[in-house]
Image (spheres, rainbow, N blue to C red):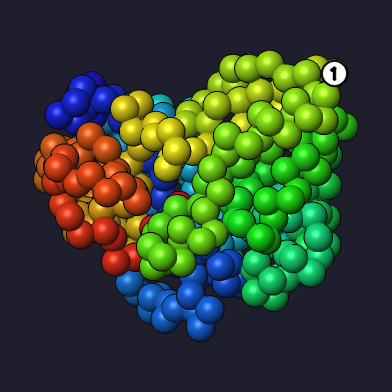
Amino acid sequence: MKKLYDQYERLHDYVRISITDRCNLRCVYCMPKEGLPFFPTDRVLSQDEIVQLITNFAQLGVHKVPITGGEPLLRTDVVDIVRRIKEIDGIEDVSITTNGLFLAKKAKALKEAGLDRLNISLDTFKPEAYKEITRGGNINQVLDGIATASALHFKKIKLNIVLIRGQNDDELLDFINYTKDHDVNVRFIEFMPIGNSLEDWKQEYVALDSVFDLCKQAGLDYHPIDLAGNRPSDNYQVEGYTGSFGLIHPISSKFCENCNRLRITADGYIKACLYWNEEINVRKLIYDFDAFKAGVQRALDNKPLNHEMAMKTTDRIIDKAPTWRHMSQIGG
């Protein structure tokens, strides 16, 4: 089996695939206030194309497939997509990243289809703040979804919190203390300048170093832990707590040197790096394995060493144009 390496000898065994660009929220870090024009249905990968594409990747050594969007649970065939991907030889782990609004209704069917893990976006515990960050969301639906999923005993449930200055950075300890009685991995994620002006982003960006200071001030004794499949998150557990917390810091402490990810957009383009504009249309190559393999390798050959996100030094930049896509159009 030919495996996928880039020019820096990084092995890629993880493909993050977006199955829709549509979303029922308008989160401030993901989409402009006025929303986005969504792709017409025929521009989005079909179920058969998704399955064939992942089958190809499995033959190239990929074994981990997170499904994203937009909001993937908006697709009426999402359960069938999960089931068919889990049936592909070589695929060991399938997860979904969701805003959780439809999770209470679909969690049981997803579990029965073989879904291993869930990543659920929950940027605040405050109803009004949630409505503001998501531009209209109902936090009670998300909390119901988390409760339903927890009762089904998925291998792991992660809660994703994008920290935004002045909106939820005062809730860090609330989330850490949530892990006392809840077996979840709470992941704090630095706000990234994707689809936002650099000046606006600078006003809202929060580095994650403060997490440790807050823990110490609160008298919480924490220690590092290993969680399977959790790159690029650095994970910790407070002594005596059931769950854990993780830090994903693409800005303050880049994890690029260990990046093993490829991303497929909902319209069938491969992005080897989240930040840069470079992408290759592999949709047209799905049913020609040799051409598909060559296209994927071409994307890897052009993958830069670092994303250089929000950095002033640009001497190592390969493609100086940041992506035109908003986060919802990439899949995170």
Q: Quadrant of the N terminus?
A: top left
Residue 236 appears left or right of 89: right
As helix, strand or loop, the secondary structure at mark 1 comes to loop
In the rendered image, residue 258, in percent from the top left (x then y), is placed at 35, 26
Residue 69 appears left or right of 168: left
Residue 289 figure quarter = top left
Task: Work out which residue is located at the far right of the displayed protein and give it.
Answer: 181
Residue 75 appears left or right of 256: right
Name which residue lies at 15% across and 29% down.
Answer: 7
Residue 60 figure quarter = top left
Question: Can residue 65 be spotted in the picture?
Answer: no
Residue 265 figure quarter = bottom left
Q: Nearer the viewer, residue 303 or 2?
A: 303
Q: Nearer the viewer, residue 199 or 284?
A: 199
In the rendered image, residue 152, in percent from the top left (x then y), is placed at 78, 39
In the rendered image, residue 34, in percent from the top left (x then y), is placed at 51, 83
In this view, 19 is above or below 138: above
Name which residue lies at 73% across and 64% down.
Answer: 130
Mark 1 residue type: Gly
Determine which residue is flagged by label 1.
240
In this view, 298 is above or below 204: above
Q: Nearer the viewer, residue 38 or 172?
A: 172
Name which residue lies at 41% across and 50% down.
Answer: 17
Residue 183 appears left or right of 234: right
In this view, 150 is above or below 217: below
Question: Can residue 275 be spotted in the picture?
Answer: yes
Mark 1 closeness class: few <14, some 14–19, many ≥20 residues within 10 Å: few
Looking at the image, how many numbered discs can be counted on the residues?
1
Name which residue lies at 19% across and 31% down.
Answer: 6
